[in-house]
Image: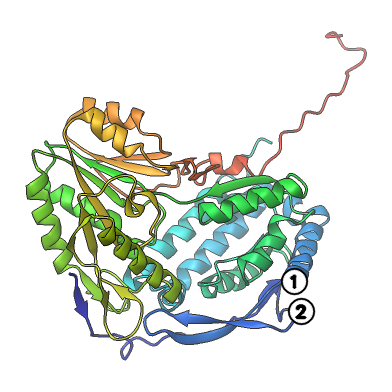
Amino acid sequence: MGSHSEDSLVSSFKIPTIKFTKLFINGEFVDSISGKTFETIDPRTGEVIARIAEGDKEDVDLAVKAARDAFDSGPWPRLPGTERAKIMMKYADLIDQNVEELAALDTIDAGKLFSMGKAVDIPQVANTLRYYAGAADKIHGELSPALAAGCTMVVKPAEQTPLSALYYAHLAKLAGIPDGVLNVVTGFGPTAGAAISSHMDIDVVSFTGSTEVGRKVMQAAAESNLKVVSLELGGKSPLIIFDDANVEVAAQLALVGILFNKGEICVASSRVYVQEGIYDELVKKLVEKAKAWVVGDPFDPQVQQGPQVDKTQFEKILSYIEHGKREGATLLTGGKPLGGKGYYIEPTIFTDFKEEMLIANDEIFGPVMALAKFKTIDEAIERANKTRYGLAAGIVTKDLNVANTVSRSIRAGTIWINCYFAFDNDCPFGGYKMSGFGRDFGLEALHKYLHVKSVVTPLYNTPWL
């Protein structure tokens, strides 16, 4: 089991005052039309942080009207690309200047490690804006690529984590992004989310979430105005470790691959296949590392894993662990909640799983690894592909021929060789199969926010006619 830290830096770190709890529509923070609110919960304690405005269909209608007016008659799409780029650069600078507060909001709202948010996650948001700002004046013909393309938008953040999205809206206003270009409607999927998916005046929907909800988004888009849909959905990503791998390096990659952000990441390496020659040694190393993994308050810089995002997810993960035990997988380590309050779970490793088991089939979205042994390359490829998902995969080997063979054979959108979580703004990201379609990052991400139009004009009395 992972070690649990009861220490807390809350006493030495001042939790920011929650400044923004209302909807952001047409450049203003406003109450929902119904006046309803919902609680956002601190997963470290299970206590209420704040009450957030609960947007509904009527609020989405207002936000869409603001975005449509800003697109049809506002300055943003008509600005030269260089001017949009300047504003996006200022937006990125403001994010950097407020990195500590943004990271703290994600920590208290989502249980993310404060140190990771401050050093990696929030700076990456700023860098992504800068990347697409550089493309804004190079367009021949998600937030950052959509802004670069001159689009206007309505953003609905996950209901579990609305705080940072509202703060980003505030910074967008400060950066000079015109009113109506960026609107944020907080609320629930079956109401606000459904209203967006089925809205007749929205041209494109980009959705990140579960495959089940992705289906509903597609259906609503088809039954309304056939809007373009881009989906980044679930994953059950395999990590394949060959006999020639460095066991220490491979074990660390495997562990971080499943425990990063407490397993709440779509590309988590939740299925790990290890070649038989190093299997026993690697299992021993993995168990040692998992037991030493520090779970606790995400503000503590010594902590490696914070709480799950909410009680529902916490209970879902524990339910999958029980399924794994009942279906006959061997629980090597972990499997239990940690601490007296909050939504903490031990790093958990199963072995002897079969692909038809729920722990091998379903996206658990938690710190649960399924570990198996394989003999040949062909067996590894076959087992890795035995999933309805196809978001990512990892390969650990020193043999370039093996790496090339396996990477070309696995049906997944991103293949990492001797690394994991190696994201880059130049590297398009997206899924195969039921992990969705469409790409984020790279210039590929711009394409979903652009339409190709052919304009033909005859040139009379010219030498060419």
Give the residue number, with chain letter if any, for mark 1: 59
Whether residue 270 is visible, yes or no, is yes
Residue 110, given in percent of the width and then of the height, sits at 43, 72
Give the residue number, with chain letter if any, for mark 2: 33
Q: Secondary structure at mark 2?
A: loop
Residue under the point 26% across and 52% down: 370
Q: Horizontal placement of 425 versus 347: left or right?
A: right
Q: Secondary structure at mark 1?
A: helix
Residue 30 falls in image quadrant: bottom right
Q: Confirm or deny contact between disc 1 and disc 2 (CB under 8 A).
A: yes
- Image quadrant holding the C terminus, namely top right
Residue under the point 28% across and 69% down: 305
- Image quadrant holding the N terminus, namely bottom left
Q: Residues within 10 Å of mark 1 (few under 14, many from 20)?
A: many
The disc at residue 267 is none
Q: Amino acid at mark 2?
A: Ile
Residue 11, given in percent of the width and then of the height, sits at 31, 91
Residue under the point 29% across and 32% down: 381
Q: Residues within 10 Å of mark 2 (few under 14, many from 20)?
A: some
Seen in the picture, residue 102 relative to 11 is either above or below; the reply is above
Q: Nearer the viewer, residue 138 or 374?
A: 374
